Image (cartoon, grey):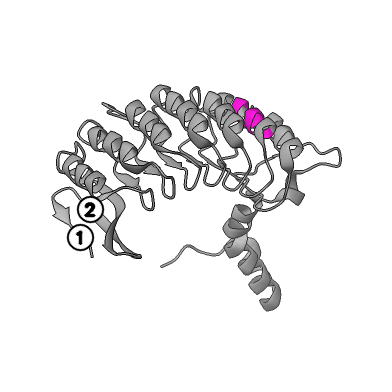
Amino acid sequence: RGAPLPQPLLKMGGAARCLSLALLLLSPLLASAQHRCRLGDVRQPDGSFQLGSCEELLLFGESVGDGGAIKLAAALAGNTKLQLVDLWHNGVGAAGAKALGAAIAKNTVLKRLYLNENPLGAEGAKGIAAGLAKARGLRHLWLTRTNAGDEGAAALATALAANHVLEALDMWECGISGAGAEAIAVALKGRHDGLRTLELRGNAMGDRGARAFAALLPTNKPLSTLDLLNTGVSAEGRALLREGLRKAASLPYMVLFEDAIGPHQQRTSWEEKGQKNAP
């Protein structure tokens, strides 16, 4: 038998009882919705942010810019509730990124920060990297299409060498060449904790990057997914990656890259240590 209804509900009439029962059943969902906040819920008339009991802040496409990011960072630094901030496509540049970097260095609760499609540039990526080096709470960092370039990648590599808690780094199409990819791979060599997923899709790292990651695979234990699709790797580079994968220190281990099957065609290869599932 289920739990008995509360006494006040038993004393109500039919319609009132149904309404109260519905509210009782929906209360967990309503509470959850209250913890998922949008810009209008948190921005004050003076432009400052009052985060209250928010656990997720969803600001996709709100165009808060550097000014909004700086004010958000001020509220975020000492916040003890917020676990996810989505600032995807908000016009945040270097100044806003530096402020957010300083905030994540202090905040121990925030787990996910999404900064995709913001014009951070190398200086903004350096600002985020400075915070990441000291961050002890952040687990997922998304920086796709932020123009980080090799300078930004090198700064993030330095941060990754010091950070042992970040689990996922997403940097699709960031203008990273072989030099930047190599810096990241070197920073992750010999690691027994830290990053589990690294996504570098759409960066022209070429065989220099492939060679660096091939050398990384046998030495790194936590990394389990590496996305290198559309990175300009040749057949020679792919062979190096397969050999590195064969010796990989982790199981399971998945690496995504591309195989040419014609002058204008490619296929995705999905490789696993001990198993090959390329189409």
**Can residue 137 be seen in this snapshot?**
no
How packed mark 2 is, by other alpha carbons closer than 10 Å (few <14, some 14-19, many 20 or more), is some
Q: Position of residue 110 (x, y in %)?
A: 54, 36
Q: What residue is rendered at 50% in x and 42% in y?
A: 175
The disc, 1 or 2, on the residue closer to the chain's N-terminal end is: 2
Q: Foreground: 53 or 178?
A: 178
Q: What residue is rendered at 31% in x and 30% in y?
A: 193
- Residue matched to label 1: 277
Q: Is residue 10 above or below residue 99?
A: below
Secondary structure category for the residue under label 1: loop
Q: Foreground: 135 or 152?
A: 152
Residue 274 placement, left or right of 226 = left
Q: Do callouts 1 and 2 mark residues in contact (Cβ within 8 Å)? A: yes
Q: Position of residue 167 (x, y in %)?
A: 40, 38
Residue 141 placement, left or right of 210 = right
The amino acid type found where label 2 is placed reads: Glu
Q: Foreground: 82 or 16?
A: 82
Q: Position of residue 82 (x, y in %)?
A: 60, 39
Quadrant that contains the N terminus: bottom left
Question: Which residue is most to the front?
Answer: 263
Quadrant that contains the C terminus: bottom left
In which image quadrant can residue 48 be found?
Answer: top right
Q: Position of residue 28 (x, y in %)?
A: 57, 56
Q: Is residue 23 above or below residue 243?
A: below
- Residue matched to label 2: 271
In which image quadrant can residue 205 be found?
Answer: top left
Secondary structure category for the residue under label 2: strand
**Can residue 112 be seen in this snapshot?**
yes
Residue 265 placement, left or right of 243 = right
Span colored in magenta: 96-102
